[in-house]
Image (cartoon, grey):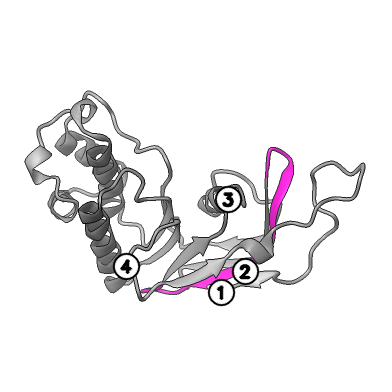
Amino acid sequence: MLLTVENLAVARGGIALLEGVALSLSPGQALILRGPNGIGKTTLLRCVAGLQPAAGGRIVLPPEGAAYAGHADGLKATLSVAENLAFWARIYGQSDTAPAMAAMNLEALADRPAQNLSAGQKRRLGLARLLVTGRRLWLLDEPTVSLDAASVALFAAAVRGHLGRGGAALIATHIDLGLAEAATLDLAPCRAKPSAPGQGGGFDAPFDGARCSM
């Protein structure tokens, strides 16, 4: 198992968002998180990634952790495309960036400074970082923002290749990625119940058991 989430509760700014979330991912599996804006998809992913504490529950990750791709592309503006990718590869103890460059169609842009890329090109480069992390678990928050249809297809192929190599992916997205093999989890049933008057924005009471699960 590459990810286990049990009875997870998350909050943002002291406001309870989700509770009773349960899911698991084995090698080769992908799960799409669905739900309206503001329900807590980003907060859930950040908690799983270890970027903020959960309000409750249990998260079990692979020993090496996970690769997280949020709304920011994490690029150094003055470095070229190739230099940016090489920088991230070194961070993760990797060296070969050629497959990532090819997978996201960046080869013709290798020498272009990141600051001179279009929004879609920057996004492709940001996503290419996933391919040089060596992490088996990918956590992706709206990864296709700024991508055209052709680039979305490239990204879906990269995810499919990752799954084929024994990886797993947890993805929050509103669009169809064309990943027929991916399961879907609707977070609407996980929405935290409103607190009673005078109790602020916290959770009503300790929650025992999954409210929603894959």
Q: Residue 95, percent across and down?
A: 18, 48
Between the residue at mark 2 and the residue at mark 1, the CA separation in whole angstroms equals 7 Å
Residue depicted at 69% across the width and 37% down the height = 13
- Count of marks, rendered view: 4
Residue 178's mark?
4
Foreground disc of the pair 4, 3: 4
User: Crowdedness of circle 1 by 10 Å Cα count: few (<14), some, many (20+)?
Assistant: some
Residue 47's mark?
3
Q: Residue 188, percent across and down?
A: 64, 62
- Tag 2 secondary structure: strand
Q: In the rendered structure, which amino acid carries the disc numbered 2?
A: Ala
Magenta-highlighted residues: 12-29
Between the residue at mark 2 and the residue at mark 4, the CA separation in whole angstroms equals 24 Å
Q: Residue 190, percent across and down?
A: 67, 63
Mark 1 and 3 residues: CB-CB less than 8 Å, in contact? no
Q: Is residue 20 magenta?
A: yes
Foreground disc of the pair 1, 4: 4
Q: Is residue 77 above or below residue 97?
A: above
Magenta span: predominant SS is strand
Mark 2 and 1 residues: CB-CB less than 8 Å, in contact? yes
Question: Left or right: 58 with respect to 130?
Answer: right
Residue depicted at 28% across the width and 62% down the height = 156
Residue 90 visible somewhere in the drawing? no
Q: Earlier in the sequence, mark 1 or mark 3?
A: 3
Quadrant in which the C terminus appears: bottom right
Q: Nearer the viewer, residue 119 or 166?
A: 119
Which residue in the protein does label 2 denote? 22
Which residue in the protein does label 1 denote? 214
Foreground disc of the pair 2, 4: 4
Between the residue at mark 2 and the residue at mark 3, the CA separation in whole angstroms equals 13 Å
